[in-house]
Image (spheres, rainbow, N blue to C red):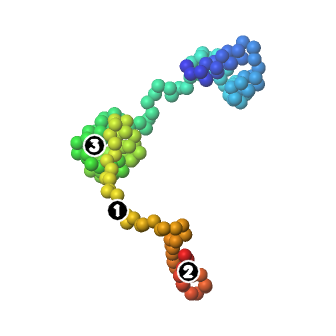
Amino acid sequence: MTKKELVRVHVIKSLIEDKMTSRDAAEVLSLSERQIKRLKAGVKKEGEVFVIHKNRGRKPKHTIPSEIREEIVSLTRNKYKEVNYTHLAELLREQEGINISQSSVSRILKAKGIKSPRKHKPPKPHRTRERKSQEGLLLQMDASPYEWIPGIKCSLHGA
């Protein structure tokens, strides 16, 4: 049981033993009095187990089966080595018949330590400009084509 569930059990037991009112229990657990009555009835009927959420330990219904996960990993390692996650999701849908989202593909492959390949472009060379001898000697200009005067399209030059 989690700490939160242990606190709930303790408060509900003290409520059952009349050491606490339902209003006080509701305040302590930050629940409504109706929920406190529901918890009290459940603990009386089923015991402390009633406080534990019924979905604990269950596999989600929409989880991706492990066979499909393994197939995605093997296809990525063998057939689709140089393909990024987004393209891989498209290829799986079109070529392999596996309908899965890009985020799920990403999550599965990251969990297995497979990174998305990236093409690295070499940096473009930039021409360097010599420094001016004094501050303020560099003159920079710009022209903005815009309809500054209604009906007449002209360029405003700024320096």
Under circle 2, the secondary element is: strand
Choose top left, top right, bottom left or bottom right for residue 50: top right
Q: CA distance from mark 3 to mark 1?
A: 35 Å
Relative horizontal placement of residue 47, taking residue 97 as reference (left or right): right
Under circle 3, the secondary element is: helix
Height in image: 85 above or below 143? above
Foreground mark, 2 or 3, reads 2
Residue at image mark 3:
76
Q: Quadrant of the C terminus?
A: bottom right
Q: Which residue type does callout 2 highlight?
A: Leu
Give the residue at x 44% y 35%. Answer: 61
Under circle 1, the secondary element is: loop
Give the residue at x 39% y 47%. Answer: 102
Q: CA distance from mark 1 to mark 2?
A: 31 Å
Residue at image mark 2:
156
**Hey, which residue is sitting farthest top in the picture?**
17
Q: Residues within 10 Å of mark 2 (few under 14, many from 20)?
A: few
Earlier in the chain: of badge 2 and badge 3, it is: 3
Earlier in the chain: of badge 1 and badge 2, it is: 1
Question: Can residue 115 be seen from the camera position used here?
Answer: yes
Q: Nearer the viewer, residue 38 or 12?
A: 12
Height in image: 63 above or below 156? above
Q: Which residue type does callout 3 highlight?
A: Thr
The picture places residue 76, in percent across and down from the top left corner, at 28, 43
Residue at image mark 1:
125
Height in image: 118 above or below 29? below
Q: CA distance from mark 2 to mark 3?
A: 55 Å
Q: Residues within 10 Å of mark 3 (few under 14, many from 20)?
A: some
Q: Which residue type does callout 1 highlight?
A: Pro
Q: Looking at the image, do the residues carrying marks 2 and 3 touch, with CB atoms under 8 Å apart?
A: no
Q: Residues within 10 Å of mark 1 (few under 14, many from 20)?
A: few
